[in-house]
Image (cartoon, helix red, strand yellow):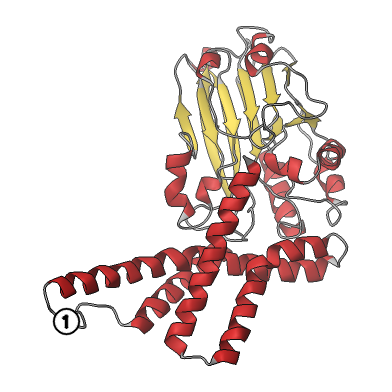
């Protein structure tokens, strides 16, 4: 599945770059040599993220950051430019053929060719410039959940949820410092990471665990594996997370001071049917059913998939992964891909789910109408607030 998604995206992205080549060539009237140069340049930009990732394994952090920003901003430009350009060209195609059928000229109704390039160009540039700065503004989202399951004398529990931070060359020290500062200001009782704490290989961010280790919460810090932890190399990712002071819940659960149950499962969306190395073979239902009943139960799960048979065994599922689409027009498609794609939703049997937009970015350092977030969740006792 992972390879199929990768190949599908690569094909669509490559076609978008090819489409840009024909658009530029068509309106500019370039000669043979200019077209060859343009084609080689676009070809290089198309596959530059792959080349640069390989370079970043051994190259300098500063150069890698500049090159990756360039490559991914180009990607974001193509992702927005292509659908707008296709929409305008489709309109012209329909108008021209409709007018031909009626024996009339389409010149008055058709959009001039330069406009079909410059309008999408302007929109893509505008969306992505805005999105570049939106991606740097970390929001603090607050959620209150009332329950009768907290023990007597415990009025509330404050939880800080980090999701999809994607620490790496792009989401670096400044991003991490901002997240740590907001968590420290909030003073949570519990800190959780719902996957994709890192983005890929950890060779440029080996000093980050020391910074994350300074975060403390009286009930502890817990994390689960997301799909990007697998991309980073599971062994390195596990080491990074544990050195950051998190307890990894890999298809397991614990009870915290008889106050809360917390369970976590590995993200298996990209690993096929078999469990990854070192994870237990327990099912999600078995993990939840093994926890003491009558205690508020939190399920950490990177993807926002909800198993209906497990409803009633947990009170709140915390997830991420979707980024709320992150960039246009992907965010228009996300609701059709994920049933629970952002925010808080009540489920049946007293359960609920919260899906974070994530604190970082995957790929392009751009967010459009999907600002990054740190989530603060207060579990409040109904018994003591009746």
Residue at x-position 69% and y-position 68%: 48
Q: Position of residue 142 (x, y in %)?
A: 54, 38
- Position of residue 384 relative to residue 78, above or below, is above
Judge by depth and name the residue closer to the eye, 200 or 32. Answer: 32
Residue at x-position 65% and y-position 18%: 284
Disc 1 marks which residue? Answer: 105
Judge by depth and name the residue closer to the eye, 289 or 78. Answer: 78
- Position of residue 60 relative to residue 203, above or below, is below
Q: Position of residue 87 (x, y in %)?
A: 35, 65
Residue at x-position 46% and y-position 68%: 81
Q: Is disc 1 placed on a helix, strand or loop?
A: loop
Q: Quadrant of the N terminus?
A: top right
Q: Is residue 340 left or right of residue 137?
A: left
Give the mark count: 1
Give the quadrant of residue 265: top right
Give the quadrant of residue 185: top right
């Amino acid at each position: 599945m992972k390879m199929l998604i990768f190949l599908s995206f690569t094909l669509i992205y490559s076609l978008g770059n090819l489409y840009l080549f024909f658009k530029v060539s068509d309106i500019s009237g370039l000669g043979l040599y200019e077209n060859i140069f343009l084609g080689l340049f676009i070809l290089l930009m198309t596959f530059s993220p792959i080349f640069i990732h390989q370079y970043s394994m051994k190259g300098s952090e500063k150069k890698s950051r500049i090159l990756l920003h360039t490559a991914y901003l180009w990607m974001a430009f193509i992702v927005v430019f292509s659908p707008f350009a296709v929409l305008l060209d489709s309109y012209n195609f329909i108008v021209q053929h409709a007018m031909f059928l009626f024996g009339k000229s389409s010149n008055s109704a058709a959009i001039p060719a330069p406009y079909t390039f410059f309008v999408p160009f302007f929109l893509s540039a505008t969306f992505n410039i805005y999105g570049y700065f939106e991606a740097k503004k970390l929001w603090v989202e607050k959620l209150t959940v009332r329950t009768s399951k907290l023990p007597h004398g415990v009025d509330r529990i404050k939880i800080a949820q980090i999701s999809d931070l994607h620490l790496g060359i792009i989401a670096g020290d400044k991003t991490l410092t901002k997240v740590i500062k907001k968590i420290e200001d909030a003073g949570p009782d519990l800190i959780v990471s719902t996957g994709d704490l890192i983005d890929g290989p950890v060779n440029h961010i080996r000093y980050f665990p020391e910074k994350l280790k300074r975060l403390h919460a009286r009930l502890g810090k817990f994390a689960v594996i997301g799909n990007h932890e697998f991309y980073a190399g599971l062994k390195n990712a596990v080491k990074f997370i544990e050195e950051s002071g998190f307890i990894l819940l890999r298809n397991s659960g614990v009870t915290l001071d008889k106050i809360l149950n917390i369970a976590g499962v590995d993200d298996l969306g990209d690993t096929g049917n078999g469990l990854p190395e070192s994870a237990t073979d327990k099912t999600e239902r078995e993990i939840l059913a093994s926890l003491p009943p009558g205690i508020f139960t939190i399920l950490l799960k990177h993807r926002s998939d909800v198993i209906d048979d497990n409803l009633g065994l947990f009170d709140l599922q915390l997830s991420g992964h979707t980024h709320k689409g992150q960039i246009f027009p992907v965010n228009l498609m996300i609701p059709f891909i994920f049933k629970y794609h952002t925010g808080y939703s009540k489920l049946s049997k007293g359960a609920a789910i919260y899906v974070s937009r994530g604190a970082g970015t995957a790929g392009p350092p751009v967010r459009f109408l999907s600002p990054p977030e740190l989530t603060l969740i207060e579990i409040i006792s109904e018994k003591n607030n009746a």
